Amino acid sequence: MSRLYHMTRDEGVRDMLKFLLARETQHQLQFIKAQEELEERYGVVVPGNMNDIQYSEYSHVIMNFSDGEGSRAFENQIAKDGQMFTYQENPEAMGGVPKTKPASSELHNDQG
């Protein structure tokens, strides 16, 4: 949302985005408090612990799909579960670029 904020000069849109950014901050703070409470009771909590079905080789890889290197800040740091974060610049999507068929002409909005 912050990128959208900087992309527009419309004060009404900016006002709405300021509110949404504040709400997102509030939600993140609530999630942090909830996680702290759970960790006091049960130890380290990884949301939706799906270790048995996830591709665990990606669970600690920070993948940078953006301009800049801000996400590199976590590289080589240790996560709460004791494993080290690694960093990957411009990773390829799993399986490569998908091969898709052109969309049906019925889906095009060119019927003037």
Image: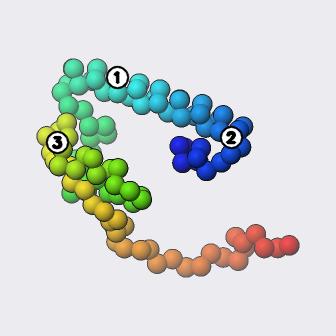
The residue at the point 18 percent across, 27 percent down is 43
Real-space CA distance between mark 2 and mark 1, rounded to the nearest whole angstrom: 30 Å
> In the rendered view, does 102 fall on the left or right side of 85?
right
- For disc 2, the marked residue is 13
Amino acid at the residue labelled 2: Val
Can see residue 54?
no
Quick check: 37 above or below 80? above
- Marked residue nearer the N-terminal end (2 or 1): 2
User: Which of the pair 66/26 is nearer the observer?
Assistant: 66
- Say whether residue 1 is left or right of residue 112: left
Amino acid type shown at disc 1: Lys
Contact (CB < 8 A) between labels 3 and 1?
Answer: no
The relative height of residue 21 versus residue 39 in the rendered view (above or below) is: below
Say which of marks 2 and 1 sits in front: 2
Q: Is residue 107 left or right of residue 111?
A: left
Dot placed on the residue nearer the N-terminal end, 3 or 1? 1
Kindly indicate the quadrant of the structure image that contains residue 101.
bottom right
Residue 69: quadrant of the picture: bottom left
| Residue name at image x 31 percent, y 39 percent | 48
The residue that disc 1 covers is: 33
* Numbered disc in front, either 3 or 2: 2
Percent across and percent down for residue 3 are 54, 48
Residue placed under numbered mark 3 in the picture: 78
